[in-house]
Every structure is written in structure tokens, then in C-alpha cells.
Image (cartoon, grey):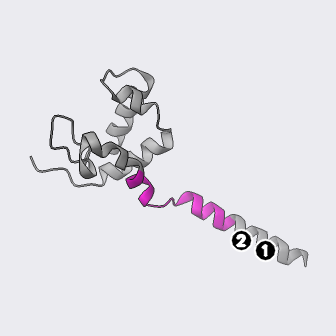
């Protein structure tokens, strides 16, 4: 009976680890949706605000971290960036980087 319990516990642990390593692909899109009012649908801005679609993931993360820490000046972004966790910033940056850059 003990080996069965160990096997069940091990399989549950493995499943939990596998789930933790592969988050729902929609999470990045869901986090990024909060940016659409200014940065456009799917990160393709039609106004003065920069587009995020197609931007390098590392660049988005760097800029968000700079806004969050106060090293980068902005109008509303410093306040907004403080509301995101590092994981949320990474999810959104990954999603925006996967979107096609808008035509110029």
C-alpha cells in the first residue's frame, strides 16, 4: 500500500511541477489587455504612444522595470508599472514580442 501512495504522490507532484512550468498561454494576453487603451489593440498603437507589438521582450522588460523603479520618467507609466509583478511584466512582454509589428 505504501508504494502505491508514494507513486500517487509522486505523480501529483510531477503534474503540479509540469503545470507550473507551462503557464496558460492566454495569461500574457490577459495581462497585456490592460495596456490596450494607450498602446492599441494587440500593442499596435495608432496614436502618439509607442507600439509594443513586435518589440523585443528584453526591451519591454527593461523599460517596465525602469518605470517601476523610477529610473525612467513618464506621465502615467511609472504609476502603472508599480502595479505589475515581475512575472506579469514578463508575461506581457513575451506576448507583445510575439505579436506582429504594425506596418509603418
Determine crowd level at label 1: few under 14, some 14-19, many 20+ residues with C-alpha closer than 10 A. few
Q: Marks 2 and 1: CB-CB under 8 Å?
A: yes
- Counting from the top left corner in percent of width and height, residue 31 is at 41, 48
The part of the chain drawn in magenta is 14-30
Residue identifier under label 1: 7
Measure how far apart labels 2 and 1 are at the Cα level.
6 Å
Principal secondary structure, stretch drawn in magenta? helix
Q: Which residue is most to the front? A: 37
- Counting from the top left corner in percent of width and height, residue 6 is at 82, 71
Give the structural element (helix, strand or loop) at label 2: helix
Q: Which residue is most to the right? A: 1
- Residue drawn at x 45%, y 55% is 27
Horizontal side of 40 relative to 30 (left or right) equals left
- Would you say residue 56 is visible in this rendering? no
- Residue drawn at x 43%, y 60% is 25
- Counting from the top left corner in percent of width and height, residue 99 is at 27, 54
Determine crowd level at label 2: few under 14, some 14-19, many 20+ residues with C-alpha closer than 10 A. few
Horizontal side of 2 relative to 39 (left or right) equals right
Dividing the picture into quadrants, the one containing residue 73 is top left
- Residue drawn at x 34%, y 29% is 77
* Placement of 70 over or under 55, stated as above or below: above
Horizontal side of 36 relative to 7 (left or right) equals left
- Residue drawn at x 34%, y 44% is 57
Dividing the picture into quadrants, the one containing residue 21 is bottom right
* Placement of 22 over or under 49, stated as above or below: below
Give the structural element (helix, strand or loop) at label 1: helix
Magenta segment: does it hold 20?
A: yes
Residue identifier under label 2: 11
Magenta segment: does it hold 41?
A: no
- Counting from the top left corner in percent of width and height, residue 86 is at 49, 39
Horizontal side of 73 relative to 102 (left or right) equals right
Amino acid at each position: 500500500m505504501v508504494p502505491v501512495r508514494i507513486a500517487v504522490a509522486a505523480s501529483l507532484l510531477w503534474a503540479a511541477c509540469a503545470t507550473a512550468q507551462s503557464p496558460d498561454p492566454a495569461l500574457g494576453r490577459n495581462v497585456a489587455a490592460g495596456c490596450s487603451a494607450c498602446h492599441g489593440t494587440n500593442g499596435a498603437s495608432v496614436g502618439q504612444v509607442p507600439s509594443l507589438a513586435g518589440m523585443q521582450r528584453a526591451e519591454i522588460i527593461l523599460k517596465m522595470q525602469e518605470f517601476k523603479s523610477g529610473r525612467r520618467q513618464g506621465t502615467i507609466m511609472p504609476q502603472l508599472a508599480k502595479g505589475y509583478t515581475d512575472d506579469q511584466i514578463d508575461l506581457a512582454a513575451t506576448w507583445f514580442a510575439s505579436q506582429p509589428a504594425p506596418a509603418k
